[in-house]
Amino acid sequence: MKWLKNIEELTEHIFSNKERASKRHLNSSGAEKPREVFDRVCQQIGNETEAFGFKYFPSQHKLKLESTDKKFSLSLRFSSNRDNVAGQYIELSGAFSIESKELKKFSNKYPLLNYSSDLMLGRDIGVLIDGGKGNLIWNLADEQDCKKSISIITKTARGSLAQLFEDIQNTKLIVDQIEKDNFELNNPMITVQYLLMHDHKNVAEKYLSKFLRRKPEKILADYHKAVEQFDSEGIPEQFIHGMGYGHEIALLEKEYGLELNVPNKR
């Protein structure tokens, strides 16, 4: 069980795996193939969560849970590593996502330029597990780590993940927590579309105004730069990912007619 907290640790992890894999030909242990171990562990987690409403899809290595009204779905996807080495290192990680049919409908009707999505929230499962921060991975080639992965993931899926899924279906709770600056959805675009979908334009305006005051200061600088660009060149025809939060918030303000309380606003 290992936490990857930053890009430096992720880079070190990748290089160590590649170094191990480069010596794969020296391994003659006759150990079980990594794919077989990974498949078996994922299936066992699926078996142990089935009684709690989850359905396991082996071909996708995915657990899925639907709300009673079928308007929301929760997925927990497992992944491994192409640089696994039999008997030495077999990686297991998990990431969950929560989708909303109502959000998809609204987002398609009122997209941000060409951008729409049904994804409310998507995170590494590590955010729900105590003991560390960052992305969480297990080595299934280690017997104790393998047992821990099954136990911890199963417990988390049936406990805090299922509870989060229940909570996120409570519109009043989610809007209240966003307004208190205690919670947000997958990104500012999704959070704003969700709030507008439920007629909380004022909360969306407060949320974005607070967002622009976060560190780093570059977010606010990018926002002012984008506003000036839109005033002189007009609104872009398409949404381009990777332009930064400041650019995205400027688009949200223009496209949805929001009034933001922003430092140094002209």
Image (cartoon, rainbow, N blue to C red):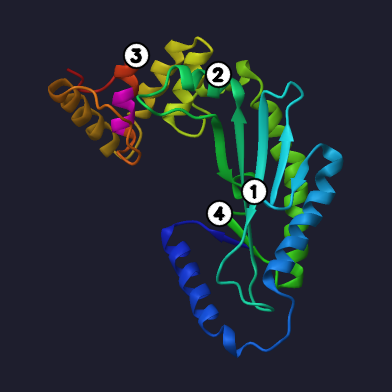
Q: Is residue 179 visible?
A: no
First along the sequence among labels 1 and 3: 1
Q: Position of residue 183 (x, y in %)?
A: 53, 29
| Residue wearing tag 1 | 77
The crowding category of the residue bearing disc 2, from other C-alpha atoms within 10 Å (few below 14, some 14 to 19, many at least 20), is many
What is the C-alpha distance between the residues marked 2 and 4? 27 Å
Q: Quick one: quadrant of the C terminus? A: top left
| Residue wearing tag 3 | 258
| Residue wearing tag 4 | 135
- Residue drawn at x 61%, y 50% is 126
SS assignment at label 4: strand
Looking at the image, residue 58 sits to the left or right of residue 100; the answer is right
Q: Position of residue 239 (x, y in %)?
A: 33, 31
Q: In which quarter of the image is residue 209?
A: top left
| Residue wearing tag 2 | 175
Instruction: Relative to 212, say whether 94 is above or below.
Output: below
Q: In which quarter of the image is residue 86?
A: bottom right
What is the C-alpha distance between the residues marked 3 and 4? 35 Å
Q: Main secondary structure of the magenta part?
A: helix
Amino acid marked by disc 3:
Leu
Q: Is residue 82 magenta?
A: no
Looking at the image, residue 107 sits to the left or right of residue 266; the answer is right
Q: What stretch is highlighted in magenta?
A: 246-251
Which dot, 1 or 3, sits closer to the camera? Answer: 1
Q: Which numbered circle lies on residue 174?
A: none
Residues marked 3 and 4 touching at CB (< 8 Å): no
SS assignment at label 3: loop
